[in-house]
Amino acid sequence: MRCPACGASDDRVIDSREAEDGSAVRRRRECARCRARFSTVERLAGPTPFSVLKRSGEREPFSLAKLTAGIAAACKSTSVSEDVVLGLAGEVEEAVRRHGAAATSDQIGVAVLDRLRDLDEVAYLRFVSVYKGFATAGDFAREAGLLRKHTEPKHHQGADARLPAGPAGSHSER
Ligand SMILES: [Zn+2]
């Protein structure tokens, strides 16, 4: 490991201990040239198991494919391209994995919404409707109102005129 202080790649391990509940090893190292001390963390190579805690209390393995499909469905026929969807899903996965071995479906949903909000209004509202399971058009309109406050003064045509039918079919109706 290259020394962060002088760039030499000759060091010795002065201490090793378990970290992250035994799934990693933290090693304290000392540079043989300049004596700077630094730490490295060693983990199993490859993706670590990561699960999603659903509202029902069920736990299921995290699936990037599933997350990507959910985002792609919300972004269908919007300004958000397939590449952006893939990038966004990867970003969300990276963000939620920082929570540890599991994240709740709410944490994941919010992480997606935080990013979609700035990308495309229609995609954002569709994802909201699916993710929050909105039962009524009133809830949906309220969320759209909140969004407009958030994004003003970007659009003046209003979201409603441009909203295609959402996944549930009738969200754009009043
Ligand atoms: Zn050094």
Image (cartoon, rainbow, N blue to C red):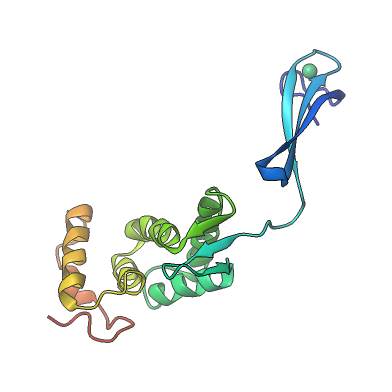
Q: Give the position of the N terminus as an image quadrant.
A: top right
Q: Position of residue 165 (x, y in %)?
A: 27, 83
Q: With 84 as the anchor, is 171 left or right in this view?
A: left
Which quarter of the image is occupied by the C terminus?
bottom left
Residue displayed at 41% across by 67% down: 55
Using the rendered view, name the quadrant where residue 37 is placed.
top right
Residue 98 position in % (x across, y down): 55, 48
Q: Residue at x 46, y 67 (%)?
A: 57
Q: Residue furthest front?
A: 57
Q: Residue furthest left?
A: 174
Of 158 and 125, which appears nearest the observer? Answer: 125
Q: Which of 66/59 is in front?
A: 59
27 or 58, nearer to the observer? 58
Q: Position of residue 23 (x, y in %)?
A: 72, 47
Q: Is residue 60 above or below residue 135?
A: above
Determine whether, in the image, residue 153 is placed left or right of residue 4: left
Position above or below: 95 against 134: above
Q: In the image, what residue occupies the spot 51% across and 51% down?
A: 95
